[in-house]
Image (cartoon, grey):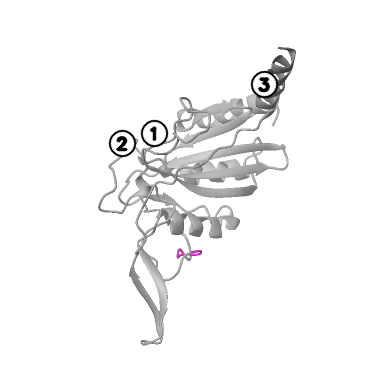
Amino acid sequence: MSDTQATSLVEHLTARFGETLGIRVERNEATAELAAADLIAVATALRDEAPFRFTELVDLCGIDYLGYGQTEWDTRDVSWTGFSRGVEGEAMGRFTWAERPRGVSPPRRFAAVIHLLSIEHNQRLRLRVFCADDSLPVVPSVTGIWPGSNWFEREAFDLYGILFDGHPDLRRILTDYGFVGHPFRKDFPLIGNVEVRYDPTQKRVVYEPVSIEPRVLVPRVIRDDADLVQAKAEAADRWREN
C-alpha cells in the first residue's frame, strides 16, 4: 500500500470511528487496535461501508505477549563466533511447567490479529484485538462477517487457547483430541508435557510423562558475509605486500 493510500485510509478510519480505534502506520501498513466489545460493529462497517469495502479476510491469528521485549539472545554484544548467544536460558518455554520462570507480562497478554483486504480500493488493514482476561482469553467470532475465518479461529483456539465467542464449531484443528495445553503459548514447555508410544502389552497407544530433559541449545554461527570476505582479502593483500 502506497503512502497516499495509507494516509487516505487513516483519514477515513479516524473520521468514521474516532477514538474507538487506535491507529498507527508503520512502513505504509495501517494497524487499528480496538476493544473486543467493539469488534463486531467495526468489522461489519469495514466490510459493508463504501469508503472501506474490506470484503476479504486474508488471515487471522493469535499472539501471546508473555515476556514481550525480553530475550535470552545476546544479539548486540556477541562474540565473533556466536557461541555466547542463547546460553542464559531465560525463555519460559525452555523449562518444565513447575520450574518455568515467571517473566514480566504486559497488561494484556493475548490478542487476536486480523488481516483484511479491500479489492475495490486496493487497500489492506490489520486489526488487533486484545483479550480482556488473561486467564480466560475471549474475543467475538467474526465468522458471521467473514465465513473464511472459521478455520483460522479454530487454529488460534487450538494453539493459543483463545476462545471465539459465537463460533459455530470451536474445537481443535491441529493437535490430537487428548492434547493437553496450547503449544504456541510462551509458557508451554518446548519439550512438551507428555510423550506418546505404542504399548505392545496393552496393544494401544499410551501417554506418559515426557522423559526428555529440558536444555538450552547453543547455536554455532558461521559468519561468511560479504564484509568478512572483503576484510579477509584486504588482510591477505597487506600480508603479501609486507
Residue 141 sits inside the magenta stretch: no
Q: Residues within 10 Å of mark 3 (few under 14, many from 20)?
A: few
Q: Are marks 1 and 3 in contact (CB under 8 Å)?
A: no
Q: Quadrant of residue 218?
A: top left
Q: Mark 2 or mark 1, which is nearer the start of the sequence?
A: 1
Q: Which residue is mark 2?
A: 104
Comparing 26 with 179, the one in front is 179
Mark nearest the camera among 1 and 2 is 1
Kind of residue sitting beneath label 2: Val
Which secondary structure lies at badge 1?
loop
**In the displayed structure image, the side of residue 3 where residue 104 appears, left or right:** left
Q: Mark 3 or mark 1, which is nearer the start of the sequence?
A: 1
Which of the image's four quarters has the C terminus? top right
Which residue is situated farthest in the left direction here? 98
Which secondary structure lies at badge 2?
loop
Mark nearest the camera among 1 and 3 is 3
Q: Is residue 159 above or below residue 121?
A: below
Q: Mark 2 or mark 3, which is nearer the start of the sequence?
A: 2
Q: Quadrant of residue 46?
A: top right
**Number of the label disc, if any, that sits on residue 231:** 3
Residue 52, position as x, y percentages in the image: 64, 37
Kind of residue sitting beneath label 1: Gln
Query: Which SS type dominates the magenta stretch?
Result: loop
**Number of the label disc, if any, that sits on residue 70:** 1
Mark nearest the camera among 3 and 2 is 3
**In the displayed structure image, the side of residue 34 where residue 222 appears, left or right:** right
Which of the image's four quarters has the N terminus? top right
Q: Are marks 1 and 2 in contact (CB under 8 Å)?
A: yes
